[in-house]
Amino acid sequence: MAVTRPNILTNSTALQQYCDAVKALKNEFTGPTTQTVHIPGPSHPVSTYDLFVVWHVNAMMTLTPAGQSDRNAAHSGPVFGPWHRFMLRQFELNLQRVLSNPAFGLPYWDWAADGQLPKNQQTQSKLFAPDGIGGSGTPITTGPFVFNPADSQSFRLRVETDSNGDLRQTNRGLNRTLGKQTQAPVLPKKADTAQAIATAPYDGPPWNRSSNSFRNHLEGWLPYGMHNKVHVWVGGDMLPAASPNDPVFFLNHCNVDRIWEAWMKKHGRVYLPDQSAPASLKGHRINDLLSSLISAPPTPAAVLDSTQQYVYDSLAV
């Protein structure tokens, strides 16, 4: 039976459950998806939560296909939608497991709703309140994800990336700089979302950051905005490849997935490129396997219809 993914801005129960489950995964080192991951430095435990950070970094560092620099295994090409959908579903299943609640649906952050607010009110969104997920800080000092060096159970970053994008160990608090980046002083608005949904096809030549397509509008390369703008607006640890270190990452991407679902409701469950595309698009064709560290990898074709696993409480954008 499909679970319902709720709006975290209007569902306080989902907010509390999400925070509880994230903290549980952050301190789980023997779960069914945990595994040994090589990170330079001394022996270092990687929790179930941390594994999703490692997975995202690895996908970003995997060029698809090798030998070019336009696309990686999760971004800057057609697979952006399917790969993140697959990742979110694996994360949702783990949240359900630690909550012992198979009916739990990963909540989404409708950032365009907050984007409708005046600039000085956007950082005051209830999501970033002390009884939400906390606000700005280096590190943050409010909310459920505050780092306390003396408390081994407190939320902490254990992996991050260096200036070259390579994984390294760390042991620190979570950084956020809401609305402080000059490239993204405000969040996207509902008009931006509506424009993206009106754009077709799903993707097209040159299948990268220059494509005039829905995927590229949603990802936020052409024009700059949407998903990319949200990462930059949140700032701090949402900026590098290790961005899943901030639990807001999954709320952002759940909304991205919701927008994709709204697009498919309008345009159909279609995906490009098909399997007849040349080897230069390997990793992004409809029957190519997605990058995975968690479970057997599906193809983009296998995740186009997710309605047997989950639905959204609303597709209104």
Image (cartoon, grey):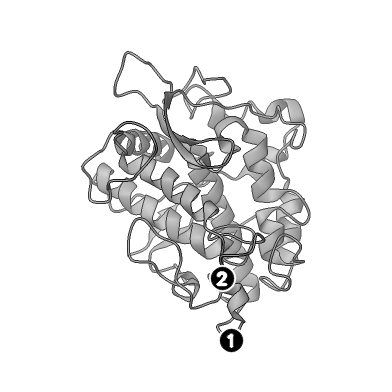
Quadrant housing the N terminus: bottom left
- Residue 114, horizontal then vertical, whole percent: 66, 38
What is the CA distance from the residue labelled 2 to the residue labelled 1?
A: 11 Å
Left or right: where 308 falls relative to 68: left
Q: Which mark, residue 284?
A: 2
- Residue 164, horizontal then vertical, whole percent: 58, 40
Q: Residue at x 72, y 71 (%)?
A: 200
Q: Residue at x 58, y 23 (%)?
A: 136
296 and 43: which is toward the camera? 43
Left or right: where 206 falls relative to 316: right
Please tell me which of labels 2 and 1 falls first in the chain.
1
* Numbered disc 2: secondary structure: loop
Quadrant housing the C terminus: bottom right
- Residue 258, horizontal then vertical, whole percent: 55, 57
* Residue linked to disc 1: 276
85 and 44: which is toward the camera? 44
* On screen, residue 13 above or below 170: below
* Numbered disc 1: secondary structure: loop
314 and 55: which is toward the camera? 55
Q: Residue at x 60, y 73 (%)?
A: 281
